[in-house]
Image: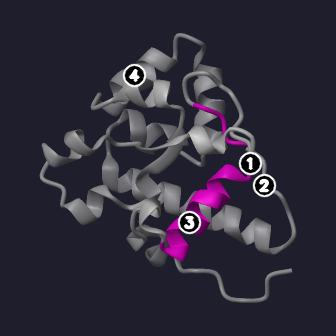
Amino acid sequence: MFTGLLPEIEDLIEADWPKRKSRLARSILVTTLRGGAKDLYSGEVISPDNISIRQYHHIFPKSYLEKRDYSEEEINQALNVALITPTANRKISAKRPRDYIQEIENNSIEDIKERLKTHMIPLEPLIDEDYEEFIKQRAQMVYKGMSELTNGKDWRP
């Protein structure tokens, strides 16, 4: 069992893009995948067998945030990342969160809620397009997931 200290919520918020290989950013990503994360469009579970074909995706698209004058550092926060298929990444592209969520909802609102939950992605600030609130809520979700993992529990949405 893990006996070290967990990062503070503020540390989670400040963690940078996982592709830069920072330990904290990678820990955030691993934590979000431990609950059986599903691709947002297909619903396919991310597994060791298919993780190599996943792409890093800005949950709030980069161009969307740039138009709203967010800094590069704010845009590339680890909490703004999800692993998804290349197909899903192309479909989402630079769309507003509310727009791509509506496309996914062609399944059902319950399906999309469940898929987002598997990545520890809070729905309400995403569809409200409230980036600051999204980051705060996701940080709290990830912190809770890390806490459960350190106590020997596997969290599930």
Please state which of residues 122 and 35 is positioned toward the viewer in this rendering. 35
What residue sits right under mark 3 in the picture? 26
Could you classify mark 3 by the number of other residues whose Cα lies within 10 Å: few (under 14), some (14-19), or many (20 or more)?
some
Q: Which mark is residue 91?
A: 4
What residue is rendered at 40% in x and 62% in y?
A: 17
**Mark earlier in primary sequence (4, 1):** 1
Q: Residue 35: which disc?
A: 1
Under circle 3, the secondary element is helix
- Name the kind of residue labelled 2 in the image: Trp
Predominant SS of the magenta segment: helix
Q: Is residue 74 magenta?
A: no
> Earlier along the polypeptide chain: callout 1 or callout 3?
3
**Magenta segment boundaries in residue numbering:** 22-39
Disc nearer the start of the sequence (2/1): 1
Ranked by sequence position, the earlier of labels 2 and 4 is 4
Q: Secondary structure at mark 2?
A: loop
For marks 2 and 3, give the one nearer the viewer: 3
The three-letter amino acid code for the residue at tag 4 is: Lys
Is 120 above or below relative to 16?
A: above
Q: Nearer the viewer, mark 2 or mark 4?
A: 4
Above or below, comparing residue 48 to residue 93 in the picture: below
The residue singled out by tag 2 in the image is: 155
Q: Of the residues shown, which amino acid type is indicated by label 3?
A: Arg
> Mark 1 and mark 2 in contact (Cβ < 8 Å)?
yes
Q: Nearer the viewer, residue 91 or 150?
A: 91
- Residue 63 visible in rendering: yes
Using the image, determine if residue 41 lies above or below residue 29.
above
